Amino acid sequence: MENTSAKILVAVFDRTVCVQVNGRADFTSTVDLKKLITELWERGYSHFIFDLCDCRMMDSTFMGVLAGISLQLSNGKADAPPLELLNACPRVAETLENLGVSHLFKIGDSTGPISDKFEPLAQGDPASRVEVARTCLEAHRTLMELNPGNAQKFKDVAQFLAEDVKRLEIGNQK
C-alpha cells in the first residue's frame, strides 16, 4: 500500500476556491494548505470547496486544520459554513462525525467535475520542524476544544506535541 501524502490541486474562479485532495491527506500538507486558504481569504475569497472524491483517508491533523480554518473563517457566525466538503468517502465522513466536527462543514456530493483548471498547490519554503509541530498541536487542541470526547483520544498526542514544540524552540535558540 502506498503511503505517500495527498496531492493537492487548487482552482480559483469568481470568488470561489476549489481544492482537490487526492490520496492520503495528512499533516505534511497542512502548513502550505493553511497558508493558501488564509491568503485567499484575506484577498476576498469567501467560498471554499474541497473535493474529496479521490481522498482515501484524512489524519486527525488534517481534519483539525480544516476544522480550525472553518472556525476562523466563520468568525463565530452561525450561518452557512465557509468550507464545503464534497464527495467524502464513507471512512472520512464517519471520522468527521465521530470527532464531532462535521457541523463545521457543508457536506455533500457533486455529479461532475468542479473545474478543469486545477493546478498543484504551490509549495513554499519547506516548513520547519517546529512549524509542522505547532500546526499539529494547534489542530489537535482544536479537535479537543470542539468535542470534549476528543480530549481523551488526543491528550497524549497533544502533550507529546507540546513537549516537541518546546524542545524544538529551545533548540532553535541555541
Image (tube, grey):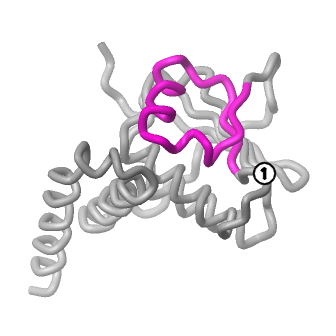
The image quarter containing residue 24 is top left
The image quarter containing residue 78 is bottom right
Q: Residue furthest top?
A: 1
Q: Is residue 55 magenta?
A: no
Write the residue at 34% across / 54% down.
140
- Measuring from the top left, give residue 2's x and y in whole percent: 32, 18
Write the residue at 20% across / 69% down.
165
- Measuring from the top left, give residue 148's x and y in whole percent: 36, 52
- Measuring from the top left, give residue 138's x and y in whole percent: 37, 63
| Viewer-proximal residue among 3 and 159 | 159
Q: Is residue 25 left or right of residue 3?
A: right
Q: Quadrant of the N terminus?
A: top left
Q: Quadrant of the C terminus?
A: bottom left
| Viewer-proximal residue among 29 and 81 | 81
Determine whether 75 is above or below 142 in the image.
below
Q: Is residue 107 left or right of residue 148?
A: right
| Viewer-proximal residue among 129 and 83 | 83
Residue designated by label 1: 80
User: Which residue range is magenta in the image?
Assistant: 83-108
Amino acid residing under circle 1: Ala
Determine whether 127 is above or below 20 in the image.
below
Write the residue at 10% across / 72% down.
167
Q: Which element carries disc 1, helix, strand or loop? A: loop
Q: Is residue 36 left or right of residue 17?
A: left
- Measuring from the top left, give residue 54's x and y in whole percent: 57, 21
Q: Residue furthest front?
A: 148
Callout 1: 10 Å neighbours few (<14), some, many (20+)? few
Determine whether 61 is above or below 90 in the image.
below
| Viewer-proximal residue among 15 and 172 | 15
